[in-house]
Amino acid sequence: MANGHDQLHKTLLETFIADYVCLLWPEAAKRIDLDSIRPEPTEGYLDTQAGRGRPRRPDLVAKLYKPGSTRAEAVLHIEIEKRYRATLAKRLAEYNRLLHHRHDRPVLTSALILRGGKPEVVAHSLELRVFGVRVNRFDYRTLGLSRSDASGWLARPEPLAWAYAALMHMPNHTRAKHRIACLLRIRKAWTRLRPRERFLLINCIQNYLRLEKHEELDYERILEEIGCREEIEAMELTWSDEIRAEGIQEGMCLTTISLLERKFGVLSSRVRQRIEAQSIAELEQLARRLLDADSLGDLGLA
């Protein structure tokens, strides 16, 4: 199970993947069945160029369908980059080629860049020319968070944009005001968000807008002044309870995976993901059935 920022953003994307499509490709989103988008297990893709045989594992892949269609029209590919690197375009082009070869479908490729890079959503092209003639062109998009203006993103209708606003800058706002602005946006939409969605949005804000001691005092003062201290504290308390439950669930997942691999050998990424998606109660049932099981199929994991 992955940890840290990569896993936080991957989980956000898996939950709000339709929002991401609307943010990065608004013109295409109108023609896509957004409710049908489901992230797929990212099995290793093998690049045998120059005999190096380097394994490639994309961060997130999903198929895109037209409304009412059962045939995928394209593939969505997203890479999560902690920092911008000059080699990004070449690496994305390699993934694009591999995914196109695997699925025989056009690929919409993009990168979410946490730090550095150009701000906002930017369309890029990488051209290959020979003797002055263009023989290939790769188009992709990036979303650079750290240099973007949070105010515009908090005004957007997509909840994912509110989480991303926590990683952006907010002119003329202290960190305390910035955090409150993000939390108030979630509070405004509280009733239309599912509990899991609320948790993930608040979790992103709490991770990226942590306050120092003196900032906490400013935070409490502002909440009192605007008269919403009790509501915000209730939201944060719900988040704290979920964090404790997440810790228990993660520990149980790691233990279950260890026991299964001891009995059946190394698990595939698909099986690991199915285990990680189970609730605490489901993991408890799985543990009870494990001793008598002769295969992963007996446990419903094959």
Image: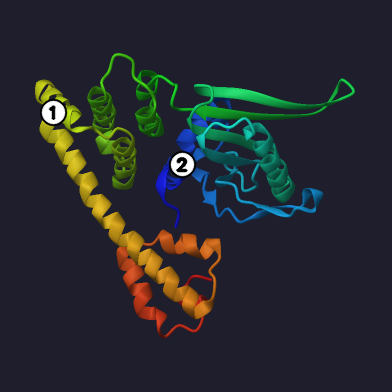
> Which residue is nearer to you in this view: 132 or 226?
132
Residue at the spot of label 1: 217
Residue at the spot of label 2: 13
- What SS does tag 2 mark? helix
Q: Is residue 254 found left or right of 183 in the rendered image?
A: right
Labels 2, 1: front one: 1
Question: Which residue lies most toward the front here?
Answer: 213
Q: How is the image coloured?
A: rainbow
- Quarter of the image with the C terminus is bottom right
Whether residue 55 is visible to the viewer of this picture, yes or no, is: yes
What residue lies at 50% left-to-right and 75% top-to-bottom?
296
Q: How far is mark 2 from mark 1, CA to CA?
A: 33 Å
What residue lies at 64% left-to-right and 34% top-to-bottom?
87
Question: Which residue lies most toward the right here?
Answer: 131
Q: Is residue 63 found left or right of 155 in the rendered image?
A: right
Give the image quarter of residue 249.
Answer: bottom left
Residue 50 coordinates in the image, percent (x, y): 80, 49
Residue 235 coordinates in the image, percent (x, y): 20, 39
Q: How many residues crowd around disc 2 within 10 Å: few (fewer than 14), some, or many (20 or more)?
A: some
What residue lies at 69% left-to-right and 35% top-to-bottom?
90
- Circles 2 and 1, Cβ within 8 Å, touching? The answer is no
Whether residue 279 is visible to the viewer of this picture, yes or no, is: no
Q: Is residue 69 found left or right of 288 in the rendered image?
A: right
Q: How many residues crowd around disc 1 within 10 Å: few (fewer than 14), some, or many (20 or more)?
A: few
Q: Please count the marks in the image.
A: 2
> Which residue is nearer to you in this view: 100 or 251?
251
Residue 221 coordinates in the image, percent (x, y): 11, 24
Name the kind of residue labelled 1 in the image. Answer: Leu
Q: Is residue 159 found left or right of 102 in the rendered image?
A: left
- What SS does tag 1 mark? helix
Q: Which mark is residue 153?
A: none
Residue 10 coordinates in the image, percent (x, y): 46, 45
